[in-house]
Amino acid sequence: MSTMSDKCLSNMKTAVNDLSKKEQLYELIRANPFVSQQDLAVELRLSRSAVAGHIASLIRERRLLGRAYVLPGKRPVMCIGAANLDRKLRSIAPMQMGTSNPATAEEVHGGVARNIAENLARLGLPSALLTAVGDDTAGMSLLQHAEDNGIDARGTLRLANTYSGTYTAVLDERGEMLLALADMALYDQLTPDFLASRAPQRTAAAMLVADLNLPLASVSMLLEDARVGAAPLIIVAVSQPKMARLPHNLHGCRLLILNRAELETRVGRKLPDEAAVGQACRDVQAQGAQDVIVTCGGEGVYYTHPEGVDWLPAPQVDVIDVTGAGDAFSAGVCWSLYQGNGDLSLACRRGLKVAAMTLESPDSVSPLLAADILDEINEFTTEFAPTLQD
């Protein structure tokens, strides 16, 4: 009897120990979905075959999905591009060129992809971020801020002996931007090889949002993937100079979001009126983009649909700071498309709502955003301008 009891006790201890190891392994994978089986084996003092057995067990339990160790749950929006430390200098009085101007200064977390990811997280969507940071305090702050706001930034490229990206905006006394300077050379390291190394996270996403801080080759790769069935790809322009990073062949692009000046750069001509903007949108669609949205600041937005191009006015707001408003608009559009409704009129009205809240806030991402903030904008109305025809 005692021999049998000792054997049962030994088996129970082994089972408890195995359970503990499996749970430890699960937590390690949660912390780093890209961890290798060899690293797991070393960390847990297990054989490779034991690690493989635990992973197989977790997959059977649907706690992990496939060999990429992707955790199940609501599929995120993956934002790929810049995460910067933004510096904002705002003049206290009307600017005078060629002399010193009294101003206020602040530093905030910014970057197009990062801003969109934070807006989406505040709106209640699971969001993830693929970016690059340096090994400086700014990089640590950006990653900590992402974690604090529920953004999955575990796939971030961390570069040694490198400063994180910075964006410095000079604003006038009304909060309108006069000039911006960007140091974003480190995003050239977000190469096709890097993106390939993050294939498990990209594959798990419900939608990809890429900004044009990415190299041309990387944008081309994302378009190629989208053409063969990857998640819908939304491309967000960041400046006129970086329009050179947008490939000529846009097949695979679900939506291109850019401003009027960036559209002029793309088509190589001035767009003096509504008809010219409409024709330019159709030209970009002929290059492969399924849809196009053109933002025009306080004048509103143009958007494409099967019958042509329409326009929506922007709501009147008391502008405090324009920084981040365009990213907020893009996030509102992405939030709407994520819900499964492809109506761009509805998406644009939701985007304009988020942008307006950002314009009325001193922050690049409005702290007032919440999951239910866009629920009231759910019906199509016909109060806007008619379709722009040829």
Image: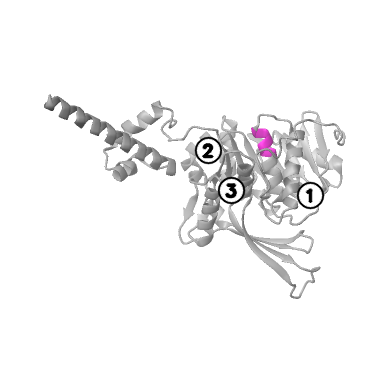
The residue where tag 3 is placed is: 81
Residue at 77% across, 63% down: 172
Would residue 28 be visible to someone looking at this image? yes
Q: Earlier in the sequence, mark 2 or mark 1?
A: 2
Residue that label 2 marks? 202
Residue sitting nearer the eye, 229 or 355? 355
The overriding secondary structure of the stretch rendered in magenta is helix
State whether residue 35 is above or below residue 162. above
* Magenta residue check for 169: no
Secondary structure under badge 1? Answer: helix
Query: Is the N terminus in the top left, top right, bottom left or bottom right quadrant?
Result: top left
Return the disc, 1 or 3, that comes first in the chain's sequence: 3
What's the residue type where badge 1 is placed?
A: Gly
Q: Position of residue 103 (x, y in %)?
A: 72, 69
Considering every residue shown, the one lying at the far front of the view is 1
Q: How far apart in space, not on screen, are marks 1 and 3 (Cα)?
A: 23 Å
Question: Marks 3 and 2, Cα distance to the nearest angstrom?
Answer: 13 Å
x and y, in percent, of residue 308 in the image = 81, 32
Q: Secondary structure at mark 3?
A: loop
Q: Which range of residues does the magenta coloring cover?
A: 333-338
Q: Residue at x 34, y 35 (%)?
A: 22
User: What is the CA distance from the residue labelled 2 to the residue labelled 1?
Assistant: 31 Å
Q: Residues within 10 Å of mark 3 (few under 14, many from 20)?
A: many
Residue 224, image quadrant = top right
21 on left or right of 357: left
- The reply to whether the C-beta atoms of the residues labelled 1 and 3 are less than 8 Å apart is no
Q: Are marks 3 and 2 in contact (CB under 8 Å)?
A: no
Residue 370: x percent and y percent? 66, 42
Would residue 381 be found to the left or right of residue 247 on screen? right
Instruction: Check whether the beta carbons of the residues at disc 2 and disc 1 lie within 8 A of each other.
Output: no
Identify the residue under disc 1: 297
Q: Secondary structure at mark 2?
A: helix
